[in-house]
Image (tube, grey):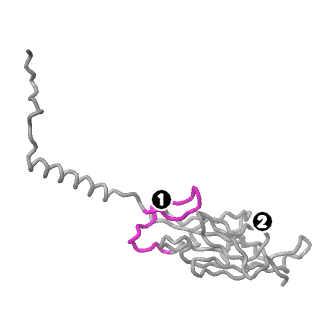
Amino acid sequence: MQISDVPDLAHTHPRPVHWLATATAMAAVVALAGLLQPDAATAGQAGTEPAGRTAPNAAPLPAPDTAAVDFPLECGGAKALVTKEATGDLDGDGNPETVAAARCDAGSGTPPNGLYVLTSTEKADAPRVVATLVDPADRQSVADLQIRDGVVRARLLGYSGPDVPGCCPDEEHNPTWRWKNGAFVRSVGGGSESRSV
């Protein structure tokens, strides 16, 4: 018979000190796993949610500054002009967003507005546009803008047809937008979508 170099473990008996050491090691692993949790999830449009939003108990970030944003407007050399803005927490993450109405600074006439949602993060150098609520191609001007209870409310002036002069919008729209299931959902208050001005 050959004698093994490894001691026979079948006859060893665990002692209380072994159980205590095992329990202490398991408690350390569980505590470490609790400390290494991922950041809390926050609302954002699909594929656009920036990493690094504040932790649940951290102070909220400041509202995004419209002066630091490049708006997606084609102004042909003219600057973008912010005509209205409002701030508030739209997605429930504890940090304010800014909604801005911007248009090209044409100097004369009534260029259409775009209505944009801006957000900022601790890691980003500047705020960025995360949603377009009104596209300038819709030929509408933002006459009033506010945020109440996480809802964006706007009064939009538009045109009933292409023959209406650009100086004189003849329709008014009063839409609202609410963050729901990862997107801004538009609804119209008061029943009708538009009314004559």
Camera-nearest residue between 184 and 166 = 184
Q: Which residue is mark 2?
A: 137
Looking at the magenta stretch, what is its main secondary structure?
A: loop
Seen as rendered, the residue at the extreme bottom is 197
The disc placed on residue 92 is none
Was residue 43 drawn as part of the magenta stretch in this picture?
yes
Mark toward the start of the polypeptide (2 vs 1)? 1
Read off the magenta span: 40-62
Asked which secondary structure carries label 2, the reply is helix
Q: Please state which amino acid type lies under the numbered disc 1.
A: Ala
Q: Residue at x 73, y 76 (%)?
A: 188
- Examine the image and state in which quarter residue 9 appears: top left
Quadrant in the picture for the C terminus: bottom right
Q: Position of residue 180 (x, y in %)?
A: 60, 68
- Position above or below: 139 against 36: below
Corner quadrant of residue 191: bottom right
* Rendered view: 88 above or below 36: below
- Number of on-image labels: 2
Q: Give the amino acid type for the residue marked by disc 2 in the picture.
A: Ala
For the residues carrying marks 2 and 1, which lies nearer the camera in this image? 1
Quadrant in the picture for residue 2: top left
Q: Quadrant of the N terminus?
A: top left
Disc 1 residue crowd, few under 14, some 14–19, many 20+, Cα 10 Å: few
**Residue 16 picture location, percent across and down:** 9, 50
Q: Which residue is mark 1?
A: 51
Question: Residue 111 at what x, y percent from top left?
Answer: 77, 73
Check residue 21 for magenta coloring. Answer: no
Query: Element type at marker 1?
Result: loop
Is label 2 in contact with label 1 (beta carbons under 8 Å)? no
Please name the residue shown 43% across and 67% down the image.
Answer: 54
